[in-house]
Image (tube, rainbow, N blue to C red):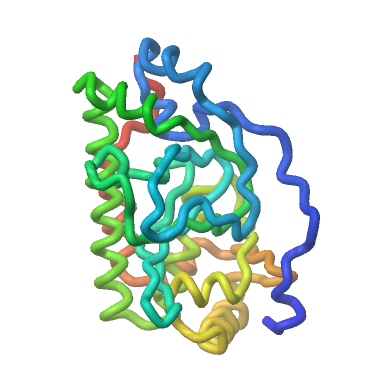
Amino acid sequence: MTAAADKPAKNERIGPPPDPRQNRLLAALPEAEYGRWLAQLEPVDLPLGKVIYESGSRLSHVYFPTTAIVSLLYLMEDGASAEIAVVGFDGLVGISLFMGGETTPSRAVVQSAGHGYRLKASVLMQEFNRAGPVLHLLLRYTQALITQMAQTSVCIRHHSLDQQLCRLLLLSLDRLPSNELVMTQELIASMLGVRREGVTEAAGKLHEAGLISYRRGHITVLDRPGLEQRTCECYAVMKREYDRLLPATIAT
């Protein structure tokens, strides 16, 4: 992995917007609630590196990724950052809105380009305050996201950079329809809170082991079982909690 190879291709077409119900939360909505939201859902392009919201900003919308992945980063006063969670078609970006805070100290950045939908904050809150199925679904999702945040903190403290990188790649794969990720070394370093040289070394080990290939900001996972064997237990903890709390099928 070289610096020259780290630049993603420019002007990549993301493609037409997919069905909103490619998002797991939207797919889990009962028909009545989904019908009320459908006309309010606005398709959005989510290109690599796009900042959805900055630390401390007031949220006007929540975002439901469908084919994109968004990284939630915590920013330090000296400009350093570290990832606290990733959100893909499994959830939404903007939980602070319905948790009562309206702002958050984290920053949301698109980690892998794709599409999504956004919904006005007022529409979400109106549905949330009905205290019906939407409230219970969003609270279950929030519990799963909190588990991911807590486990990420444990992972950063106790596990090697190689294991952390495997965890990040596996979490990303779970939120994409293919085994290819568009992700630069700089972005990975920012998410893991390490120097870029450390990411280069860790990714090089995975490449030498035949687990991944890397070209122009594109990471292709060649051996997923190999990554799962190499990562720490944190990935399995996160995955079990998401599978336990979030329905896999469309609600009726």
Residue at 64% x, 66% y is 219
Residue at 28% x, 35% y is 138
Left or right: 19, with 63 as reference point: right
Q: Tell me residue 61's x, y (percent).
A: 44, 37
Residue at 37% x, 10% y is 32
Q: Tell which of 185 and 41 is nearer to you.
A: 41
Displayed quadrant of residue 25: top left
- Counting labels gives 0
Task: Please identify the quadrant where the N terminus is shown.
Answer: bottom right
Q: Tell me residue 220's x, y (percent).
A: 64, 63
Q: Tell me residue 6's x, y (percent).
A: 70, 75
Q: Tell which of 195 and 60 is nearer to you.
A: 60
Task: Please identify the quadrant where the C terminus is shown.
Answer: top left
For residue 125, above or below residue 187: above
Q: Tell me residue 19's x, y (percent).
A: 58, 27
Left or right: 176, with 168 as reference point: right
Residue at 47% x, 47% y is 88
Q: Tell which of 221 and 196 is nearer to you.
A: 196
